[in-house]
Structures are given as C-alpha cells and as structure tokens.
Amino acid sequence: MADRGLSTAAGRCRPLRDGALALAVWGPVLLVTGVFAWLLADLLWQGGARLSLQFILSAPRDAGRAGGIAPILVSTGLIVAVAMLAAVPLGFATAALLAEFTRPGGAVGRAIGLSLDVLAGVPSIVFGLFGNAFFCVWLGLGFSILSGGLTLACMALPILVRTAEAGLRMVPDDWRHGAAALGLSRRAALLHILLPAATPALAAGLMLGLGRALAETAALIFTSGYVDRMPSSLFDSGRALSVHIYDLTMNVAGGNPNAYASALALIVLLLAINGFALWLAELLLERRMLVQ
C-alpha cells in the first residue's frame, strides 16, 4: 500500500516537473523571440514609411535628416568587400592548417586556437584603436574604406576559421584514406576532395563573417570615418550604414526618422544573410547524414 501511495504521488508530481522543464526551455526562447519581434515592430513603425526605393537610391541631405542612403550603401558594400577579400583566403588557409596539417592537440594547433578564441572575445572598440594605429597611421592609409575593411577582416577571421575548420573536420577520414590510396598528395586531396566536400561550411562561415562585418560600428568610426558622399576609390573615407545610424541618432537633431529607416534596411540585410547561412548549415547537416 505504501509503495502504491508513493507511486501515485510521483505520478502526480511528474506533470509539474514536466511543466517546469518545458517552461525553463521555452521561456528563454519566447523571451528572445519577443524582444526581437518588439525591436522589428518598432523599426517598422518608426521607419517603415520612409524606407522606399527613392530612399535607397538617393544621397543624404541636410546632414542626413533628408534624402537617402545610396552613398552609405556603396561605402558599406566596399568596406565589406575589402574585409572579405582579405579575410577569406587567410581564414580558409588557417582552417586547412588546423584541420589537416597540424597534429590534434599539438602545441601549434593549441596556440593558434587560443589566439583565435582571444580575438573572438576582443571588443570592437579595441579593434578600432588597433586599426587606426596600424592601418591609418603606421601604413599611412588614413581614414579610408581600405583601413575600415582591413580592420573588419581582423574581426571576421575567428568566425571564418572556426567554421571552416569544423567543416573540414566533419569530412569522414575514409575520404582522406581513399585519396591516399589513390596516390594523391595531401595538398591535392585538400583542393580536390576535402574543400569541395566542406563547401557548405565554408559558405556558411563566409555569410556569418559578412553579417559580423555589416553590423560593426565602433571599429569603423576610428578607421573608415564619417564622410557621407559617394566614394571614388578605396582610399576615400566612407561612412558605413551602422556608423550612419549612430551619427543620425547621437549627433544630428531631428535625424531619428532616417535613422530608423536606415536601421530597418540594415536589419533586412542581416536577416537575409543569416537566413542564407542557416540554410547552408542545414544543407551541411544533410550532407553529413547522407555520408554517414
């Protein structure tokens, strides 16, 4: 009888425990989703009416209170292009070194991995100070699109390297053994077998690095500058979209309406990039399951 009473009490408590567990899991999810929905709704309410094709294609006027963001978008695209062109070859080469040419747990791999982890945790303002001292002053590039892009490349490297390294390590060892049995060198196996197999992870890392570069503000204030006119070369100063939003909000009286519209344009770009990265991650998972 006592055992039956205990089992009955346990059965009554089980729904409470299950409910508490469900609340602990779904509560933070709903909270984060609600915060993002609130943010997006506020941007749509404040800036949706101003976001139009004319806003996208026209230049800012009256310190950004009027006009659009065409030169801002061009400067942002050039800064991000410089960052990706500089970061992608170095990042993928470092990932290949870590995944294929260093001994697991070795001193070299640990040192590089520790450096990447430290870089990933460095605040963007510190990258901005470094970029200003190294690219702007020491290399003589000044406040320019080139300085801002190279600084963002340093910031995007940890994401690119870690994502690409994970993709290469997910390729089954049987593929490496098969390549060696066919007489392929490690370099040939990497170029013709491993990298194509890890293409979804490489593309996902590229998209995540691109999203990181688009959202940065502090580093670009110290490197690419504030100029809001259409750039004519990479050595011109250029205002990124995130810097434009900051300037309109903090330094321009009456600039909030255009700041909201610019922020909404930035959110749309980030959603598109992150959505594409998520699709590539799912594709990578499907490939891995098929291989296994």
Image: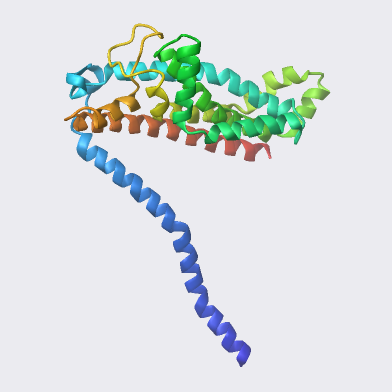
Q: Residue at x 52, y 30 (%)?
A: 204
State the scheme by which the image is colored.
rainbow
Expressed as whole percent of the image width and height from the top left, the position of residue 39 reads 30, 43
Q: Is residue 22 above or below residue 268?
A: below
Give above or below for 286 relative to 16.
Answer: above
Q: Is residue 46 left or right of residue 129?
A: left
Eyeballing the image, is 7 above or below 209?
A: below
Residue at left offset 43%, top offset 18%:
148
State the residue in front, 186 or 266.
Answer: 266
Is residue 81 at least partly visible in the picture? no
Q: Quadrant of residue 161?
A: top right
Number of marks: 0
Residue 283 screen position, x and y as percent: 54, 35
Residue farthest bottom in this picture: 1
Q: Is 258 or 204 nearer to us in this picture?
A: 258
Residue 224: which quarter of the image? Answer: top left
* Residue 262 in sight: yes
Which quadrant holds the C terminus?
A: top right
Q: Is residue 216 left or right of residue 228?
A: right
Query: In the rendered view of the protein, which quadrant contains the N terminus?
Result: bottom right
Identity of the residue furthest to the top in this view: 232
Vertical position of residue 149 compared to residue 2: above or below? above
Camera-side residue: 115 or 201?
115
Residue plotted at (46% across, 24% down): 129
Q: Position of residue 110 (x, y in %)?
A: 70, 34
Relative placement, left or right, of 5 versus 79 is right
At which x and y percent is residue 12? 50, 79
Q: Which is more toward the observer, 261 or 277? A: 261
